[in-house]
């Protein structure tokens, strides 16, 4: 992507309209007021399960834990065959080969965080090496972090070039760009970073690493969804969205689905274009789903932790 | 001088250490023996019950993890705070519950707290055991709390039954969801205020005022409630609790209703009450390791 594209991006224009903070928060809170019950709720929960990137990103992750998580991702509720598999299993690069083997033939994707996740504080060469290795090991999806330090210092060109270089290193793998919105301070920055990422070649934009608080919030996700909508109108390209971190309940997940539908439309209500990055969300979805099918409120103890 | 406007107290529910309004917005009224209004109280809904289950569940591990000594201190503290408000409770016991001997009932309630406080660090030693094994193993049996217990407060008394039921369940590390007696919701919420000032960690004891009958089957069917303590002796209710609660093997404790005077007696207390809501766990351990 030539640098001229970037400079046009940063001059006053549609994508640089300041974000109305109060308006965005007010609008986002409206999506939590919709009533979704019975069959619609069941459909919504199943859709949310199929959009989940079941994630484990801890220092204590082991091959055994990843294998177990993969089994759970393929068959989230062994008692109910109508429950779909999750979209992907998201792990550290070192565990990609384990996940690839465990998920072979299941249709569940392997996502790997890369680029010195979660801080991104390594030389670009090192980060590119990590991305190439993950892609070579079989990851279909790469979740990268942007250099927030550079972004906040105004070095947008550097951020853009890094994303473009990493996109190239991904090869056929899909690239999700993590903005780490909790560190970007303002909605204007979130909007600008979204546009930079999309112009530089992101297939998905993602809110957070889950390691910084606040992680995904409704208003931040709304700002990013609107950036995706504007980018689509401008270029015709369709970019996906992944809120991650802090989404723990079925109710929250349904709120996000409502927001996607009312901002981008039905076209985005597919695992190809919308994902939840979460670890504990899946159990709550399963618990609420079983409540809907049995009519009885469930105990968290009855659902496996990993 | 003009008459001063009345300042009436709003009674709310006690969930997770906070006084909250019912999600339903419904209220009920409580009357004294001459049918004069005492106060309006919240009528807890099924949703309130579910919120309470969450609060009780999240508090359970921490409560059971405290030292037995500390649990005893806190139960004793409840007794102290109750004693300090004895005149209020005696007055309410007459007006709301129609108690014949409010002083005796209040004193029995305070004594009950102190009694169970004393048991806290002795339960394991007396209910547990070191078992003889024919081999080079140790075998231990230790009592563990059942978990989240729904206490359906006894209707016979205004206070002492409920206090006894609560104390005997929480002393071993259970957390409780108390359904206040239909006849004395105001007393139950006054007792919640005692709890709120007694260092009881939030969520350990939760009190809901409602029409008992409306919530019973929901108590039984909720899979995250581990046990129910029901003493009203209604066979039809007992059967429906058993039917609905079979799904998660809920522990049920039924017994015939007692009179207020019987609750005051020392025969109403004992280790056997505590033992109703503990689960015995046996472990084997090789000798010499």
Image (cartoon, rainbow, N blue to C red):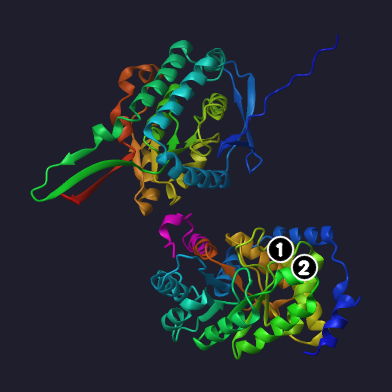
**x and y, in percent, of residue B164 in the image:** 40, 26
Mark 2 → mark 1, Cα distance in angstroms: 9 Å
Q: Are marks 2 and 1 on the same chain?
A: yes
Query: In the rendering, at what x and y percent does residue A148 appear?
Result: 71, 69
Residue tagged 2: A152
**How many discs mark residues in the rendered view?**
2
> Label 1 is found on which chain of the structure?
A
Would you place residue A15 above or below residue B113 in this image? below
* For residue A242, side relative to residue A278 (left or right): right
In the rendered view, does B208 fall on the left or right side of A302? right
Occupied quadrant, residue B4: top right
Circles 2 and 1: CB atoms closer than 8 Å: yes
- For numbered disc 1, what is the local secondary structure? helix
Front residue (pair B174, B49): B174
Which residue is at the far right?
Answer: A12
Q: Which mark is residue A244?
A: none
Mark with earlier residue (2, 1) = 2
Q: Could you classify mark 2 by the number of other residues whose Cα lies within 10 Å: few (under 14), some (14-19), or many (20 or more)?
A: some
> Is the residue B240 above or below the residue A290 in the image?
above
Q: Please provide percent x and percent y for residue B271.
A: 29, 29
Q: Nearer the viewer, residue A226 or A130?
A: A130
Please tell me whether residue A109 belongs to the stretch shown in magenta: no
Could you tell me if residue A229 is visible in this image?
Answer: no
Q: Is residue A121 visible?
A: yes
Q: Quadrant of residue A230?
A: bottom right
Kind of element beneath mark 2:
helix
Residue A302 in magenta stretch: yes
Which range of residues does the magenta coloring cover?
A287-306
Residue A183 got which mark? 1
Q: Residue at x 47, y 73 (%)?
A: A73
């Amino acid at each position: 992507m030539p640098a001229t594209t970037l400079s046009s991006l940063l001059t006053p224009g549609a994508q640089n309209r300041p974000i109305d903070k109060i308006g965005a928060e007010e609008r986002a809170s409206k999506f939590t007021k919709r009533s979704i019950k019975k069959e619609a709720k069941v459909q919504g929960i199943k859709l949310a399960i199929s959009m989940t990137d079941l994630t484990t990103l801890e220092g204590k992750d082991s091959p055994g834990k990843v294998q177990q998580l993969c089994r759970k991702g393929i068959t989230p509720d062994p008692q109910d065959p109508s429950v779909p598999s999750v979209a992907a299993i998201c792990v550290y690069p070192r565990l990609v080969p384990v996940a690839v083997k465990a998920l072979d033939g299941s249709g569940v994707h392997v996502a790997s965080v890369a680029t010195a996740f979660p801080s991104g504080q390594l030389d670009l060469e090192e980060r590119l090496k990590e991305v190439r290795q993950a892609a070579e090991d079989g990851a279909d999806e790469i979740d990268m972090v942007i250099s927030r330090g550079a972004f906040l210092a105004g070095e947008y060109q550097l951020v853009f070039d890094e994303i473009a270089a990493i996109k190239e290193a991904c090869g056929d793998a899909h690239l999700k760009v993590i903005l780490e919105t909790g560190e970007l301070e303002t909605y204007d920055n979130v909007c600008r970073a979204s546009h930079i990422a999309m112009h530089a070649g992101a297939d998905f934009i993602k809110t957070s690493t889950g390691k910084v608080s606040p992680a995904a919030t409704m208003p931040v996700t709304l700002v990013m969804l609107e950036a995706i909508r504007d980018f689509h109108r401008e270029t015709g390209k369709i970019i996906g969205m992944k809120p991650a971190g802090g989404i723990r309940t079925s109710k929250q997940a349904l709120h996000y689905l409502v927001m996607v539908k009312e901002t981008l439309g039905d076209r985005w209500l597919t695992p190809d274009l919308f994902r939840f990055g979460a670890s504990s969300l899946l159990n709550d979805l399963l618990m609420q789903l079983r409540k809907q099918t049995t009519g009885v409120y469930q105990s968290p103890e009855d659902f496996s932790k990993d | 001088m003009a008459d001063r406007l009345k300042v009436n107290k709003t009674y709310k529910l006690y969930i997770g250490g906070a006084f909250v309004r019912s999600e339903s917005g419904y209220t009920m009224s409580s009357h004294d023996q001459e049918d004069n209004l005492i106060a309006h109280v919240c009528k807890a809904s099924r949703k309130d019950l579910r919120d309470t289950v969450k609060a009780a569940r999240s508090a359970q591990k921490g409560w059971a993890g405290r030292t037995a000594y500390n649990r005893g201190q806190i139960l004793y503290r409840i007794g102290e705070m109750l004693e300090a408000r004895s005149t209020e409770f005696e007055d309410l016991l007459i007006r709301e519950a129609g108690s014949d001997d409010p002083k005796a009932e209040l004193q029995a309630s305070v004594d009950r707290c102190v009694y169970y406080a004393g048991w806290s660090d002795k339960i394991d030693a007396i209910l547990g055991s070191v078992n003889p094994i024919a081999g080079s193993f140790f075998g231990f049996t230790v009592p563990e709390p059942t978990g989240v217990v729904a206490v359906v407060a006894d209707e016979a008394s205004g206070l002492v039954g409920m206090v006894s039921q609560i104390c005997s369940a929480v002393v071993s590390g259970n957390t409780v969801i108390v359904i206040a007696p239909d006849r004395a919701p105001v007393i139950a919420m006054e007792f919640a205020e005692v709890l709120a000032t007694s260092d009881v960690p939030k969520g350990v004891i939760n009190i809901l005022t409602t029409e008992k009958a409306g919530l019973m089957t929901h108590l039984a069917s909720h899979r995250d409630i581990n046990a129910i303590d029901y003493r009203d002796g209604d066979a039809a209710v007992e059967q429906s609790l058993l039917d609905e609660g079979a799904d998660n093997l809920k522990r049920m404790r039924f017994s015939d209703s007692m009179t207020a005077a019987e609750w005051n007696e020392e025969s109403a207390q004992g280790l056997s009450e505590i033992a109703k809501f503990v689960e015995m766990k046996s472990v084997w351990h090789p000798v010499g390791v």
